[in-house]
């Protein structure tokens, strides 16, 4: 089976990666992408959240066969130390992580929310972020998402203006 993860194609041996194998174990054990965490194994906690074709999915119960031909995005592709995603910057600024175990799943859920809704309310954040955090950092998560949303909205006019400016300069 061929799998697209973080923009790279991976050919998986059918003898090792059976169609019913949870995506989480393919990511962690076969592709060595360990940022996606195992929490509960029943899709309740969200530590294993990844994007499949842009939608947040709990990878611990998602069979490999369900992602055939789809684009999978993990926390490893969200941002980097050199170029963090605006959510990762907000997470640090608002001191969201405590133990940090659930954070990759929360960041992926938050990124999916902001991709659909650039100005979420508290109610919309609470509805979208169903991930569990034993440390109880939910108020900081909400503040960080609002901060990241504001930063993305502020950057949006500059991104829209840049192509128009470039066209004028080349004319």
Image (cartoon, helix red, strand yellow):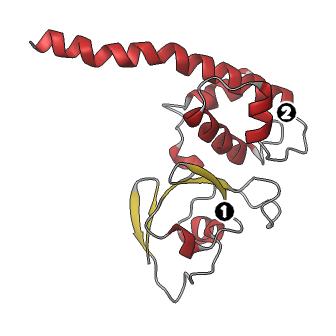
**45 left or right of 7?**
right
Q: Is residue 154 left or right of residue 57?
A: left
List x then y, in percent, for residue 129: 76, 41
Q: Are marks 1 and 2 in contact (CB under 8 Å)?
A: no
Residue 150: assigned label? none
Say which quarter of the image contains residue 135: top right
Foreground residue among 122 and 35: 122
Task: Identify the residue at horizontal 81%, vertical 66% (top origin).
Answer: 42
Indicate whether 93 appears above or below 78: above
For residue 71, side relative to residue 109 (left or right):
left
Left or right of 165? Residue 115 is: right
In the displayed structure, 81 sits above or below 131; it is: above
Q: Mark 1 points at which residue?
A: 59
Would you place residue 11 above or below residue 119 in this image? below
Residue 96 shows in the view:
no
In the rendered image, which residue does mark 2 sit on?
138
The residue lying furthest to the bottom in this view is 15
Name the element at disc 1: loop
Please tell me which residue is depicted at 46% across the width and 62% down the height of the picture. 70
Eyeballing the image, is 21 above or below 61?
A: below
């Amino acid at each position: 089976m061929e799998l697209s993860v973080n923009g790279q194609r991976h050919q998986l041996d059918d003898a090792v990666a059976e169609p019913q194998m949870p995506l989480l174990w393919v990511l962690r054990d076969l592709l060595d992408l360990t940022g996606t965490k195992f929490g509960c194994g029943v899709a309740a906690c969200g530590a294993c959240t990844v994007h499949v074709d842009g939608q947040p999915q709990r990878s611990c119960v998602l069979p490999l066969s369900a992602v055939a031909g789809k684009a999978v995005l993990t926390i490893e592709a969200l941002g980097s130390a050199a170029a963090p995603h605006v959510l990762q910057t907000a997470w640090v600024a608002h001191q969201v992580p405590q133990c940090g175990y659930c954070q990759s799943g929360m960041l992926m859920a938050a990124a999916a929310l902001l991709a659909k809704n650039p100005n979420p309310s508290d109610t919309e954040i609470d509805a979208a972020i169903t991930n569990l955090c034993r440390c109880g950092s939910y108020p900081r998560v909400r503040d960080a998402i609002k901060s990241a949303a504001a930063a993305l909205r502020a950057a949006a006019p500059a991104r829209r203006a840049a192509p128009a400016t470039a066209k004028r300069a080349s004319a």
